[in-house]
Image: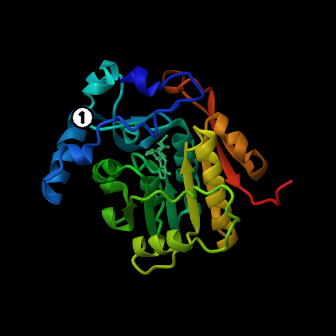
Amino acid sequence: MLRRLNFRGTRNVFGNFLYSTNATNTASQIRGLQTNEHSLRLCDIIGNITVQTSAPLVPEIKLHLITSQCKLWRSPPEDCPVSDPYWAFFWPGGQALCRYLLDNPWICKNKTVLDIGSGSGALSIAAAMCGAAFVVANDIDPVANEAMKMNIRLNNSTVENKGLEQVRFHCLDLLPTDFNEPLKKDMKSQDLAMQNTCEGQQALFNVVLIGDMCYDEDVASRLFLLLRSMQLACPESTILLGDPGRHGLSVLSDHVEIEKEYALPVDCDWGFPSSRVYRFVDRPPR
Ligand SMILES: C[S@@+](CC[C@H](N)C(=O)[O-])C[C@H]1O[C@@H](n2cnc3c(N)ncnc32)[C@H](O)[C@@H]1O
């Protein structure tokens, strides 16, 4: 398992793993179950393969994570009952950005927040803890929804009054695929999807959060297109990225400014000495 995800040390953590097509899909694996049963079964699976823990940089947030204490850490990938459990790790980019949000709660307070590639939901939870009005956690993995709900429950007492209610999960690939398509002011169907997710609320987010999504240059390029269109649509929005220095970040290097750098504790540094928070700034292409 550990070898397949290649968690430690390399800059290309995901390699060709992220879009692997041969991995078993949990949803289809337990197809036929009713939504409730399906959800309960997933909760069991998530509970069984993870431990409840927190990262040293973000002790305020407890998460269900696969750590070296878990059997799966040393097992072959086939033993994992769910495919590609990225939600089961708190990635260094996400850790730095969470720390930054919790130390600067005004960034999310009373704001509408979008967390792209939410994984465990740590950033959405941090935003909710800071008093966000509404948070959309977006991830292409439907299992991340169940993991996030479990993680919210773990932290419920610290999420301002509203508990689960201000965080919604949105399972869709929002990143544009057509590299030749000119940037548009509106996001067309994606915009509509957002509006549905927000249940009628204004789909322009005040704050957009991206934790550790630059693991691959293609994803980073698609992310760039999305962030640019979002910023064109809503120039006042704050777009923040957390990243430990992955190679895909080079795609965005002309469009980000460093906000803060955090040293990573040695025993959970993933091969990176530090992780940074960046602000996305739209500049005309050179
Ligand atoms: C490295 S994990 C980061 C998770 C979390 N943000 C953190 O920092 O701990 C990347 C996440 O992005 C999700 N992801 C990958 N491509 C995506 C896309 N096109 N749209 C939304 N989520 C995506 C993956 O499923 C995974 O949960």
Q: Position of residue 201 (x, y in %)?
A: 46, 79
Q: Quadrant of residue 205?
A: bottom right
Q: In the picture provided, is 228 more to the left or to the right than 176?
A: right
User: In the image shown, does 149 or 79 lie closer to the viewer?
Assistant: 79
Tell me the residue at 49%/37% (across/down): 91
Could you classify mark 1 by the number of other residues whose Cα lies within 10 Å: few (under 14), some (14-19), or many (20 or more)? some
Q: Position of residue 65 (x, y in %)?
A: 34, 36
User: In the image shown, does 164 or 205 lie closer to the viewer?
Assistant: 205
Identify the amino acid type marked 1. Answer: Pro
From this viewpoint, which residue is outermost toward the right?
A: 286
Tell me the residue at 64%/63% (across/down): 238
User: In the image shown, does 27 or 240 lie closer to the viewer?
Assistant: 27
Q: In the picture provided, is 272 more to the left or to the right than 259?
A: left
Give the vertical position of 240 relative to 247 (above or below): below
Q: SS at mark 1?
A: loop
Q: Quadrant of residue 52?
A: top left
Q: In the picture provided, is 136 more to the left or to the right than 66?
A: right
Q: Quadrant of residue 283?
A: bottom right
Q: Which residue is mark 1?
A: 81
From this viewpoint, which residue is outermost toward the bottom?
A: 200
Tell me the residue at 69%/58% (across/down): 180
Q: Is residue 191 visible?
A: yes
